Image (tube, rainbow, N blue to C red):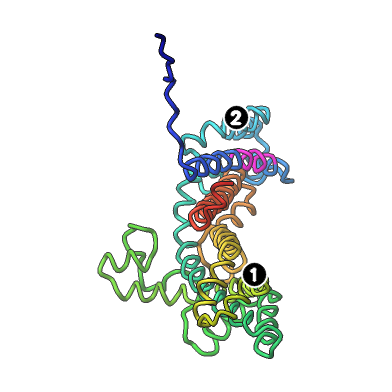
Amino acid sequence: MTTVDTGARRRPRVPPFVRYLARRLAIAVGLLLGSTLVGFLLVQAVPGDPVAANLSDEALGDPQAVAAFEERWGLDEPLPVQYLTYLANLVQGDFGMSQHTGRPVLEDLLDHVPATLEIAVPAFVLSVLLGIAIGMFAALRHGKAADQAVRVGSLLGLSTPPFWMSLLVLYLFFFVLGLSPGGGRLSPEFSPPPAVTGLYPVDALLAGEPMVAWDAVQHAALPVLVLTLITTATLVRFVRSALLEVLRKDYITAAHAKGLPARTVRYRHLLRAGLVQIMTMAGLTFASMLAGTVLIESVFAWPGVGNYAYASASALDRPAILGVTVFVAAAYILINLVVDLLYGLADPRIRLS
């Protein structure tokens, strides 16, 4: 009697969330690679001569000096070779050398990113809390005077140029009221604390210097305020629109008809249903903050990524410009990846699709 071999072993079933994660990681890697190519081509298309921007008039008159500069920065190679060389170095964590500062671009970024985080993180947390609270408040009072007031206020916040709001806030709280110090991260009488995290308030507390920490918090207060006002205006309008769409759903009407408490309907049904859209906007908002707000940082003399990008562009420092471009692209891609994963955790239908 012959027996049938059933044995080809079944392949272990991959959990849906693992497949979902693998797909998202593959997409993220592809997007990052594409962003490096687009960034490289855009930087090359920037008008201006990096040799003229970085060498003195005397050096420009010396062909050997010009040739040495081009050789050092790889400007004498064809563009495909330059890109492949840059990509190979980037994989090893080498962003190149800044032509303006003479330091590795990665080191420059690591010096400037903590300053941006110092104002971006608290502004983001405040904006999300205020945006959800005010947006829900307006949505639940749709068409009433309170809703109209919120709409007008958020429109004013969106319409106000960031540099003008920064100047207004600085003038009011520094020159008129004297409640806040001027620009920069610290007052002249204080020295930066020993670097641990790069965040001055945290590092100062770790070093046992509470006065330095308090001074750093005071300096960050106005940039955080401006960022919060601008970002909250955006989130309020988005949250209001998202929740109004959910309020029109039949199951919300049914929940009220069943006599469920208003608090339960708001938080377990209304807010939860609009959470996916709100998470998307919140993620994009935080990524834009990490990219650096050039105008706000310039007004407050804040040494963040935005200021570094502006200085690099002014000096036509191509390695630094490309480094900032890659950093910004990576921030957007990483945050979108995190949001996608949160989608999969929050809604099983997404990760099974």
Looking at this rendering, what residue extends furthest in the top direction? 1
Give the labeled residue for mark 2: 84
Place of residue 304 in the rendered image (x, y in percent of width and height, measured from the top left): 51, 61
Disc number for residue 242 = 1
- For the point 57% across and 61% down, which residue is it? 276
Residue 202 sits in quarter: bottom left
Which corner quadrant holds the N terminus? top left
Q: Of marks 2 and 1, which one's residue comes earlier in the chain?
A: 2
Q: Position of residue 271 (x, y in %)?
A: 55, 71
| Residue occupying image coordinates x 64% and y 79% | 139
Q: Nearer the viewer, residue 134 or 268?
A: 268
Residue 110, above or below 95: below
Residues rendered magenta in the picture: 33-41
Residue 233 in view (yes/no): no
Q: Is residue 264 above or below residue 10?
A: below
Q: Position of residue 182 (x, y in %)?
A: 49, 77
Q: Would you say the magenta stretch is mainly helix, strand or loop?
A: helix
Q: Are marks 2 and 1 in contact (CB under 8 Å)?
A: no
Q: Which is more toward the observer, 131 or 136? A: 136
**Label 2: how many residues lie within 10 Å, few (<14), some (14-19) or many (20+)?**
few
**Residue at 59% over, 80% down:** 257
Disc 1 element: helix
Residue plotted at (50% across, 65% down): 120
Dot 2: what SS?
helix
Residue 47 in sight: yes
**Furthest residue toward left:** 208
Residue 82 horizontal/vertical position (percent)? 62, 31
